[in-house]
Amino acid sequence: MAPRIPKAVKAPGVQYDFWAGVEYLRDYGGLTAAEFKKITLLDCGISNTKRGRACHKNGKYYKFYVPYWAYLKEDIFLGLEVWPIRSNPNTDRLSSLFVYYLAHEISHVLNSPKAKSHGRRFYEIFTRVCPVELQHYELTYKTKTASKYIKELV
């Protein structure tokens, strides 16, 4: 049987940090309890791939993953109290890029698979779920689209 997440990183500390990041978005972002529950029912995790993905089939999302390189990045939250649970000895905090990436993929999952991937509805969800201090990463990823919708919605 093929793995549910391609090239899944299964180290216990990494999995713990993944869920700590999702809980952070629930507690300090705009992820609701119902949305959090929906996320917990999906196959999700950290993958050793170039990019993350939210995969859907028959009009429903069934899995999403974020890349391991984003987890390993050494940038940290600016001015936020975050959990000291990082397994990497060089830093005791999760990467802010990693939490942004989680928010981005979760926004895809909460958006309809039939909707435009990075359209107005996606950015309405993204600006609610992702903490404001981390939304600048989206401006470097989808420069024109993000700058149009994030300015419009904020």
Image: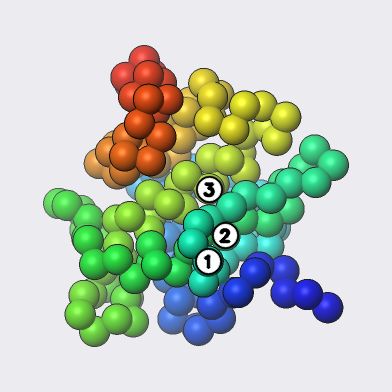
Judged left or right of residue 35, residue 15 is left
Measure how far apart labels 1 and 2 are at the Cα level.
9 Å
Residue 71 higher or lower than 56, as above or below: below
Q: Residue 124, how many percent across, how many down?
A: 48, 26
Mark closer to the observer (1, 2): 1
Q: Residue 119, how many percent across, how many down?
A: 54, 24
Q: Residue 30, how many percent across, how many down?
A: 43, 39
Instruction: Identify the amino acid type marked 2.
Output: Tyr
Residue that badge 2 annotates:
65
Q: Residue 60, how many percent across, how many down?
A: 77, 43
Residue at image point 68% right, 62% down: 43
Residue at image point 46% right, 53% down: 102
Instruction: Identify the amino acid type marked 3.
Output: Glu
Image quadrant holding the C terminus, namely top left
Residue 129 higher or lower than 124, as above or below: below
Q: Is tag 3's residue or tag 1's residue first in the polypeptide sequence?
A: 1
Residue that badge 1 annotates:
49
Pick the front one: 13 or 5: 5
Residue that badge 3 annotates:
105
Count residues near mark 2 (Cα–Cα under 10 Å), then give few for <14, some for 14-19, many for 20+.
many
Residue 115 higher or lower than 95, as above or below: above
Instruction: Identify the amino acid type marked 1.
Output: Thr
Count residues near mark 1 (Cα–Cα under 10 Å), then give few for <14, some for 14-19, many for 20+.
some
Count residues near mark 3 (Cα–Cα under 10 Å), then give few for <14, some for 14-19, many for 20+.
many
Judged left or right of residue 115, residue 77 is left
Instruction: Please identify the quarter of the rendering in which residue 151 is found.
Output: top left
Q: Are marks 1 and 2 in contact (CB under 8 Å)?
A: yes
Q: Is tag 3's residue or tag 2's residue first in the polypeptide sequence?
A: 2
